[in-house]
Structures are given as C-alpha cells and as structure tokens.
Image: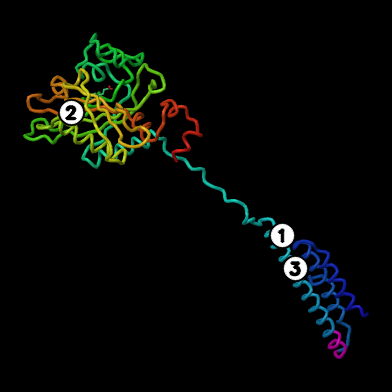
Amino acid sequence: MNELDTLVDNAKAAFAQASAPADLENAKAQFLGKSGRITELMKGMAQLSVEEKKSRGAAINVAKQAIEAALNARRQQLADEELNAQLRAEALDVTLPGRRRVGGGLHPVARAQERIEAIFSSMGFDVADGPEIETDWYSFTSLNNPPNHPARSMQDTFYVDMKDEEGLLLNLRPHTSPMQVRYAQAHAKKYAGQAHMPDIRVIAPGRTYRVDSDATHSPMFHQVEGLWIGENVSFKDLKVMYLDFIRAFFETDALKLRFRPSYFPFTEPSAEIDIMFEHGPLAGRWLEVSGSGQVHPQVVRNMGLDPERYIGFAFGSGIDRLAMLRYGVNDLRLFFDGDLRFLSQFQ
Ligand code: PHE
C-alpha cells in the first residue's frame, strides 16, 4: 500500500471516529486544512521535475478527492443520526388517548336563569340587575311594608352593619321586589313630562337572602321579579303571560296553572301561582312557584307614577324552585354544596 492510500485510510478512520459535527471539522483540518497533510504533500512537490509533478499531482488529487468524498459521506451520516435521534426523542404514540379539555359548565341555577331571561326577552321584557345590599326603603317601605308592619317577618333577612341616609341598617335584599321600584322610578323619570310613556316590562333575576335553612330553603337563594305596568294591564295579562312562560320553561303544554289567594303588602289582590304537571313523576300535585299580584296603588305612587292612570302586575318566582322542578332535584342544598359529582351531571 503506498503512502497516499494509507493517508486516505487514516482520514477515513479519523472521520469515522468523529462522533459529532465539531469533531469531524477538526479531523478535516488535519487532512484538508491549510497546514493539513494534503497541503504538505503539495508543497513537497516543489523539487520534482515537470513530468514527476504531473503524475504525482494527479495521484495526490485522487487521494484528496477520496478524502473529501469520505468527509461528505461522514457529514451526511452524522446529520442523519442527529435527525433520527431527534425523531426518536419526539416520537408520538398515536395510540395514546387524547388529552381532553376539562369541560366547564353552567351551574343548573344559572342555566335556569338564562332560560328564564331568554323566554321573557322573547316576550318583550327587559332584563335588569340591581343591588343585593339594599336600603330599608327599597326592600320594605317603598313596597308598602313600613317599619313595624307585621308582614316584615315574612321576609326576615340579614343586616349589614352600615346605615343609610335615614339612619336605618342596610339589608341583604330578602326578595327581588326592590327592583320593581328602582326600575320603574328610572323609567318614570325618563319619560316624565311626556304625553306617552311606554309600558314598563321588565324582569330582574338575582340573589336574595333570608333567615331560612332546610331542604327547600337556603339563606341565599334566587328569585326573578317580573313587572308589567301600563295604562291597561290586568290580571288577565298576568295569567296569559305566566302560562306562556311556564309552558316554554318546562317545554310542555300539559301543565295547569292556578292562582291561590294570598297576601303581600305590595300587591292587591295577591296570589300564589301554583302549577300542576299532567304527566311525569310530579303529575297531579299543585306546586307553588311564584308570588304575584296587582301592584298596590301606594307602590305605583312610590314609583313616581299616578296610580289613577297606571296599573299593572308583578310576580316574584323562585329560580331555584323552577330549576329543581325542571331537573328533578329534591334537595335545594345540592345546588349550593359545590359537589362536582352533582354539578357535572348538568354539563
Ligand atoms: N316578593 C315576594 C316574595 O318574595 C314575591 C312577590 C313578588 C309577590 C311580586 C308579589 C309580587 O315572596
């Protein structure tokens, strides 16, 4: 084996030993670099004759090309190895189950509330929101329920250690009825002095509070207030509208409605609204879902309206109660325990 063949073999061996691209480039310098072995051999030709230079030069070139080819082959090999290692590291097991997004969902009471809002919106009602911490006037007095009135005990609530302008403690509203007065006042003000005032048609859903706690009562619960006031709104409108609502809510016409005489200081006459399903597990039993009545003239006055001209009805329904009936839940407390085994059933 001549020395050029040995050189090529040595180069191949050096390249084969290089296990990373940087090592390979170092090895290349030894053979092909400016002061590498090939350059040295070229310089060594200086003393040769022209004839000798020709054959020697050609032989060195063959060796140089062989070394370059070996270098390129090794470069490619290292690049392939690197790519394969990367592919192995990033391997996907397509048989693994996918990662799911954990599904959140609306609380059943929120669902019921959204349903109620959608149904009343479709009947032309505005949806209003109001404070949960109320003044004595809005929660009671404006609703014809003055201090010391025995009807106040029907709505015993919690008080906040803060006083309003009249020096009376603020309360956590025991019902959504304060929103009747708040909304109607703003409406009356907006149209004051104008010949015509559009009817007031609003629902006001939200949280309410009472000193109450058992399977069907919770210290915090949800109501939706409804109010329709105009020049010619009667109890008949209440009945028609409420029946439409309740049938839409439960998605059945096989349902009866009954008005049972009752008492609220802010309505006269007053009635509880009961419903009865004709089919299903609750069939044949009257179920109370709402208080209602014709808005008392004093309340109309407190709204800033003339009770000789304006009349209407109001109702206050339990959203939790409606949700319980719709979803077949028999204990109200389940709604507020936050147990995912219960809640996830509604997603
Ligand atoms: N606010 C009453 C309650 O909470 C319900 C009601 C609302 C009754 C409107 C009549 C009119 O019991």
Q: Earlier in the sequence, mark 3 or mark 1?
A: 3
Left or right? Give the position of 232 relative to 272: left
Please name whichever residue, 149 or 181, is drawn nearer the observer in this view of the structure.
149
Vertical comparison of 2 with 34: above or below: below
Q: Which residue is mark 1?
A: 85
The stretch of residues the image draws in magenta is 50-56
> How many residues crowd around disc 1 within 10 Å: few (fewer than 14), some, or many (20 or more)?
few
Ligand 1, by image quadrant, is top left
Query: Residue at 28% across / 25% down in the picture?
Result: 176
> Can the viewer see residue 189 in this picture?
no
Label 2: which secondary element: strand
- The circle drawn on residue 73 is none
Q: Position of residue 69 (x, y in %)?
A: 77, 76
Q: Is residue 51 magenta?
A: yes
Please tell me in which quadrant of the rendered image residue 180 appears: top left
Q: Position of residue 275 (x, y in %)?
A: 28, 31
Q: Look at the magenta stretch and give its main secondary structure.
A: helix
Q: Which of disc 1 and disc 2 is earlier in sequence?
A: 1
**Alpha carbon separation for disc pair 2 and 1:** 77 Å
Q: Nearer the viewer, residue 125 or 151?
A: 151
Q: Is mark 3 within 8 Å of ligand 1?
A: no
Specify which label sits upstream in the sequence, 3 or 2.
Answer: 3
Give the SS element for disc 3: helix
Tag 3 residue: 77
Q: CA distance from mark 3 to mark 1?
A: 12 Å
Under mark 2, the amino acid is: Phe
